[in-house]
Image (cartoon, rainbow, N blue to C red):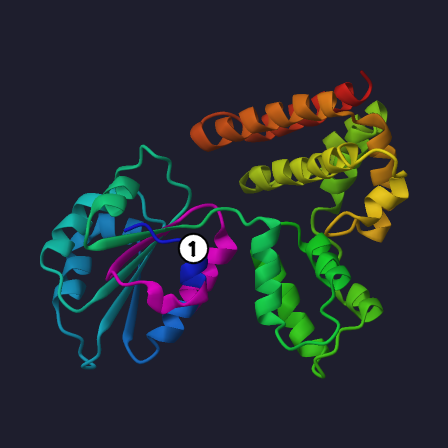
Amino acid sequence: MIYKSFLVEENINNLKNKVILFYGENLGLKNEFKKLLKHKNRGNEIISFTQEQIVKNSNTFLTEVSNISLFDKKKIFFIYDASDKILEILKNVIKDFDDQEIYLFSNSLDKRSKLRNFFEKEKLCGIVPCYIDNETALKKVIMRRLNGFEGLTALNINLILQHVGFDRTKLNNELDKILVCFDEKKIITEKLSELLDPISNDDYNLLRDNALAGNKNKTNDLLSETYFETDKNIFYLNIINQRLFRIWEINNTEKGKNLDEKMNNLKPPIFWKDKNNFINQTKIWNNKKIKTILEETYNIEKKLKSNSIINKNILVKKLILDICECANS
């Protein structure tokens, strides 16, 4: 059975199967599910394995699953870093499954994955895709965790999002700080701005903005200075796409309105520190240029997800140079 992640997030009890696989690049969401499952099973015996431990010594795992708990408690198994290597062992376990529960956590699994296909089709199992969050999903996290707070305005929500990008783990860390610092449940924008850490991807945002502005020399300098985390390449593409979509939105707003009016109608609004960069970018990027780069980012994303051998950082760096070139065309 395939579960929608947002339904599981709303209520962990929506999971009805006893063997569940969580997979995808959204580490923050998977960590939330781990916490929810551990809280739900706090009265049971929780046992953790990595796939490597099970593959090296499957008898230990099989014995743990088949034996009754010494503490007369239900056994709950967490298996980390799962891949196709563990599938045959799991099939043997599921044959004689009793009252235990098994939760597996994997990184990205493509459509060819035997493990993913098995969990999607096997009636006894469930699978929860954990894809990268969009802006709407992260807004819901903020609204849920800061429910009942005064001052939870669109401006303050946008301020939080601007500082965390699409990183749910970082978002939850920032929300933890907000819950502590605003103990009277009243958010003040100035204090919030001071509290939030500078975004960990400031270097990348600076690189993106210089490329979109067509600043060749500065872009080349920043490319050599900026550290690219391989597991964040999809996130970097999203940052570019998000900016281009916002410019596209401005370009396609009804004629007759000036730029300030168009920007004021954007929801969420452009972060005030970013306004000048955004204005300059709207003057450079027409729809034809935007479409060219969006097609390139789409093709790069497909390559990033389907080919584990290629040098992923090189693809993203080439995209940055192509953006700079396109800005000057």
In this view of the protein, can residue 220 be seen by the observer?
yes
Q: Is residue 93 magenta?
A: no
The C terminus, quarter of image? top right
In this view of the protein, can residue 167 be seen by the observer?
no
- Which stretch appears magenta? 10-35
Amino acid type, label 1: Ser
Between 38 and 241, which is closer to the camera in this rendering? Answer: 241
Q: Which residue is mark 1?
A: 5
Where in the figure is residue 288, as x and y percent of width and height?
72, 21
Residue at image x 70%, y 27%?
A: 320
Where in the figure is residue 269, as x and y percent of width and height?
77, 51
Residue at image x 54%, y 24%?
A: 299
Using a 10 Å C-alpha cutoff, classify the residue at mark 1 as few (fewer than 14 neighbours), some (14 to 19) or many (20 or more).
some
Drawn side of residue 93 relative to residue 78, left or right: left
Where in the figure is residue 122, as x and y percent of width and height?
20, 48
Residue at image x 59%, y 70%?
A: 145
Residue at image x 43%, y 29%?
A: 306
